[in-house]
Image (cartoon, rainbow, N blue to C red):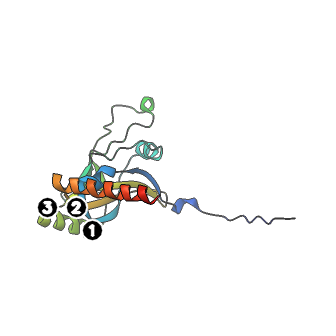
Amino acid sequence: MFTIISIINYDYRHIMTAFATNRKALFNYDIRESLEAGIELLGWEVKSIKNGRVDLSGSYGIIRGNEIWLINLNIPLYQPKNILGEPDVSKARRLLLNKKEIAEIFRKTESERISIIPLKLYSKNGRIKVNIGLGFPRNKSDKREAIKKRDISREIGQKIK
């Protein structure tokens, strides 16, 4: 019996690979809208991110002038002994958006007091992208309700099995 093996030339660059997710953001914020943005990085930062060494927790976005910056995005050094000087691993990094998107985000954050939160850091077509969410901070009562709903759904799932 013979089997036919077909070889497919498949380009793996278009697959989205998630490097980091901000799980606390979905708990601490009520995300109303999300959008994709590029991020300005150095070469060693890209290598470190692709190794999975990045921390999104505690990071947020701010608007300075006509640009959006990501603050407190912690990217540890890729090879600490090969880098000259002391690079700042938590420096502000610029998000790459077009003028219309920046104007829309600026309008929403000024009028509705919405926060800019990074949700996920991933690769798309060989480039590193950030999924940023626009949302309101939750208060303690909203967080308690979310915990109750999660516990109830977990109990129902256990009883069904």
The residue depicted at 52 percent of the width and 61 percent of the height is: 15
Q: Nearer the viewer, mark 1 or mark 2?
A: 2
Q: CA distance from mark 2 to mark 3?
A: 9 Å
Q: Is residue 9 left or right of residue 39?
A: right
The residue depicted at 35 percent of the width and 31 percent of the height is: 85
Among the two numbered marks 1 and 3 on one chain, the one whose residue lies closer to the N terminus: 1
Q: Is residue 94 left or right of residue 80?
A: left
Where disc 1 sits, the SS reads helix
Which residue, given by chain and number where applicable, does mark 2 sit on? Answer: 135
Q: CA distance from mark 1 to mark 3?
A: 17 Å
| Residue 62 visible | no
Q: Is residue 82 left or right of residue 86?
A: right
Is the residue under label 3 in contact with that under label 2 (CB below 8 Å)?
Answer: no
Which residue, given by chain and number where applicable, does mark 3 sit on? Answer: 113
Among the two numbered marks 1 and 2 on one chain, the one whose residue lies closer to the N terminus: 1
- The amino acid pointed to by label 3 is Arg
Seen from the viewer's position, the closer of residues 60 and 99 is 60
| Residue 157 visible | yes
In the displayed orientation, state which residue is furthest to the front. 159
Among the two numbered marks 2 and 3 on one chain, the one whose residue lies closer to the N terminus: 3
Quarter placement of the N terminus: bottom right
Q: Residues within 10 Å of mark 3 (few under 14, many from 20)?
A: some
Seen from the viewer's position, the closer of residues 111 and 94 is 111
Which residue, given by chain and number where applicable, does mark 1 sit on? Answer: 101
- The amino acid pointed to by label 2 is Gly
In the displayed orientation, state which residue is furthest to the right. 1
Q: Is residue 36 left or right of residue 107?
A: right
Q: Quadrant of residue 36?
A: bottom left
Q: CA distance from mark 1 to mark 2?
A: 16 Å
